[in-house]
Image (cartoon, rainbow, N blue to C red):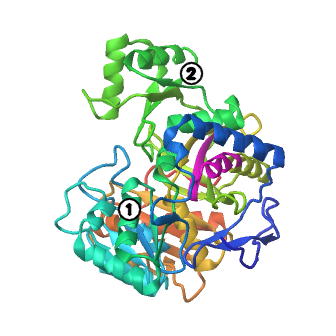
Amino acid sequence: MTVGGGLAAAGANPARPEVKRVWRVRTSLPVVEQVPVVVDAIEQARIAALAEGLRAGDPALAGADGRGTGRVRQGVGDGPALIFEDHGEIPLFTTAAPSPLEYRSLLLAEDGDVFALGGQRIPDFEAYTRDGLRLGEVDVLTRPAAAATGSPLPDALRHDPAAMARLVRLARERGSLTVIPYLSTAAAWRLAEAVAAEAGAGVDVAVLAPPPALAARVNDKAWFSRRVVEVLGPDGLPETGWAADAFELTTMLSILAKQHRRLVVKMPDSAGGVGNVVLDSAVVAGLDHDRLLEHVWQQTGRRGRGWAFPLLVGAWDDPVVDSPSVQLWVPQRGDGLPVVEGVFSQVLKGARGTFVGAAPTWLPAEWQQRLADESVRLALLFQELGYFGRCSFDAVLAGDDLDSAAAHWVDANGRWGGVSIALTAANRLVGDWQRRPFVIVQRSGLHMTARPLPAVLEDIGPLAFKASDGRTGAVVLAPCRLVEGTGMNLMVLAGDAAAAEADAAAVKTRLLGTPEDGEVSAVA
């Protein structure tokens, strides 16, 4: 990763440097540091020792050193990339249908890249990113019709002769291919290995992602919670434990119910709030073992089956001042500290805390710096273990106000995500997203008129982003729900965060025909 030229900072926020450090991982992946962090040598040595101990005690991590395997290396090549967003291997997300969000990773592609798609093609969206957003001419590869139902997209491509022939030919012609998966999995690395084997000697095949075993650990909420305690101390978590079986689960819930108003049971390796069950302590206190276990399984929507143990059990912080998310880029080990690209405030709805949007945080500079400092230390541990690529950390500020709030780290997202994809696209569109702060709007289960994407853009009208003019407005991140009339996934850029919030509300009104009920602001 090489350092590029500095960009002048926008605004006078003391948390922002006057001149920012900018990296070009590749043309389509600019990294702009927003909150500088320094970690002294003693702390770096302590974290490195923690990493060494984890490797020694976990055989899966012993080989996850970031060097790659066989013919494939971890890193970034000089040529084109294969980019795909496959949600199929995230527990509780596995369905026969591809995610309606998978198209958003097209915004990470540039001229000459290949974007692999599991679902139905929407040529209008491909034309929109190419001509409207001017992000480049990209070749789109679709999931083979003969692929086994529910199989991971990279496995489906690997078993398809036509898809493999296209990828191998591209790698040979350009001398390299970089695989950029949404989430690092064994299937993604198997595909890279297969392309390298067929392309032959002299062709550089790289994967821009952590080793899959390490990615699995990072995305495991139970594993992550233990790392928070090791790096930041026990105050970095809400009160938390791990249940190895049903008896431990109900026992821990009964004990915690006497101390906290609300509790949570989490499936360790799911995402997006889907694996969370939030329980009222008053209800828990009134149930015996059998009825409490049945109550938990009912809340999961998977009655009679439940989840696999171990399960994370803990206090659900309430009240909460804010739900910040820190977005980082983690360079390969030896290339510098993890980079904080932004601190965002999430919009969460429902008992499970489902993500429905985000905006630049309203938190004061000292809170942003604290969150950045702590998140870099966590990411540094992952980097020492061989992590490379996108990562974000979710926290809650538990308490009645900022003066009394405690920062509790509740989740690590060892993958690309709804904020990081938008952030990267914004950097591509305007050079530095801080120049045009943005709001993310993500909704499902809406009832709108189904219409083609050009009609959607016509409805948005003058509020749509145009690369040729003022560089503000609404950007479609993923088209599927919009054209089906079932939801939206948008980014709205403006001159400042408050204006972005107001414009986002206006865009939603245009698309829905009426203001959205129960809207929760992400900007204080």
Quick one: SS at disc 2? Answer: loop
Q: Which quadrant does the N terminus fall into?
A: bottom right
User: In screen coordinates, is 229 left or right of 223?
Assistant: right
> In terms of image quadrants, where is residue 28?
bottom right
- At horizontal 49% and vertical 85% (from top left) the residue drawn is 134
Q: Residue lying furthest front in this view?
A: 201
11 sits to left or right of 218: right
Amino acid under label 2?
Answer: His
Q: State the CA–CA distance, disc 1 to disc 2.
A: 36 Å
Secondary structure under the numbered disc 1 in the rendered image: loop
Structural crowding at the residue carrying mark 1, measured as other residues with C-alpha within 10 Å and reported as few (<14), some (14–19) or many (≥20): many
The part of the image, by quadrant, that contains residue 307 is top left
Can residue 398 be seen by looking at this rendering?
A: no
Which residue range is magenta in the image? 377-396
Residue type at mark 1 is Leu
Q: Is residue 387 above or below residue 200?
A: above
Pinpoint residue 451: horizontal percent, then vertical percent.
28, 73
Q: Residue at x 26, y 63 (%)?
A: 156
User: Which residue was labeled with disc 2?
Assistant: 260
| Residue 390 in magenta stretch | yes
The crowding category of the residue bearing disc 2, from other C-alpha atoms within 10 Å (few below 14, some 14 to 19, many at least 20), is some
Q: Quadrant of residue 390?
A: bottom right
Please state if 150 lies on the left or on the right of 254 as rendered: left
The residue shown at (58%, 58%) is 388
- Of residues 198 and 336, which is closer to you in this image? 198
Mark yes or no: residue 305 visible: yes
Instruction: Please identify, in this view, whether the residue under mark 1 or under mark 2 is nearer the observer.
Output: 1
Tell me where residue 420 appears, x and y as whole percent: 55, 62
> On the image, numbered disc 1 is attached to which residue?
101
Q: Position of residue 411 (x, y in %)?
A: 55, 42
Of labels 1 and 2, earlier in sequence is: 1
x and y, in percent, of residue 196 in the image? 40, 71
